[in-house]
Amino acid sequence: MRIVALVAVIAGVALTAAGAATVSGLLPYFTIQSNVAYGIFAGWAAVRDRTAPAALKGAVTLYVAITGLVYHLVLTNPASGFSVGPVERTPVEAVGNQLLHTVVPLLAVLDWLIFDQRRRFRWRHAAYWLAFPLGYLGFALVRGLITGTYPYPFIDVRELGYDGVALSAVFFAVAFWLLGLAFVAIDRIRWRAAAAERDPVT
């Protein structure tokens, strides 16, 4: 499954870059960064699973899950207020887009749910995992000052102003923190259920 995820990441980036976008033009997107991070981790963990730090696996899994959720619930959802509307893509680009926004996030979450059989996450991890999204926000804003462009509508200073971006950032930060807490809670519930199966009360 992890090798398949790695191949899906490589194929997704390559197929997306086969269109009008270039690899360098794709790099500023959270989608690409989170997918590449998970792809590297998946390839490494495929051969060194037991040495993979729990907090690191939780982080890359959460980030690529965020990619899928934001894409489907925000960017392609007209009711969200930040929908980018219909985007014309070639069949090749469309496949690459679905690999990065749907297939890889699903594989990442399934990998965690199926193969992590012991409690590994801590409640504090949910706060630690916010470091990259917050760092990405800083990167996107600084880059926007230089280039005048922003990768996502909910951090577009030209449209929202800094007050609007700050409000958007707080909303997404809280949402990502709650999602991280959900990851930890699910991890602990699964561990307790597995422990109960191993040591049933008689």
Image: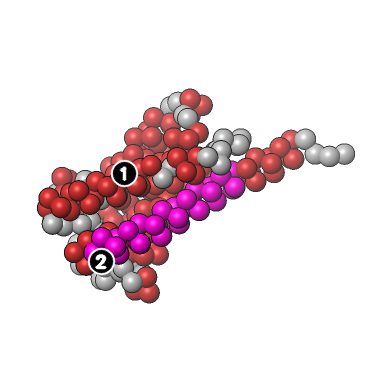
Q: Which residue is mark 2?
A: 160
In the rendered image of this protein, does residue 74 appear above or below residue 16?
below
- Counting other residues with Cα less than 10 Å from the Cα at mark 1, is it few (<14), some (14-19), or many (20 or more)? few
Write the residue at 24% across / 46% down: 139
Whether residue 105 is visible here, answered yes or no, is no
Instruction: Pick the residue in front: 189 or 9.
Output: 189
Q: Main secondary structure of the magenta part?
A: helix
Write the residue at 34% across / 35% down: 40
Q: Which quadrant holds the C terminus?
A: top right
Could you tell whether 41 is left or right of 28 in the image? right
Could you tell whether 171 is left or right of 120 in the image? left
Q: Quadrant of residue 76?
A: bottom left
* Residue extent of the magenta highlight: 160-187
Could you tell whether 106 is left or right of 196 in the image? left
Image coordinates of residue 66 in percent, x first then y, are: 40, 53
First in residue order: circle 2 vs circle 1: 1
Q: Which quadrant holds the N terminus?
A: top left
Q: Which residue is mark 1?
A: 135
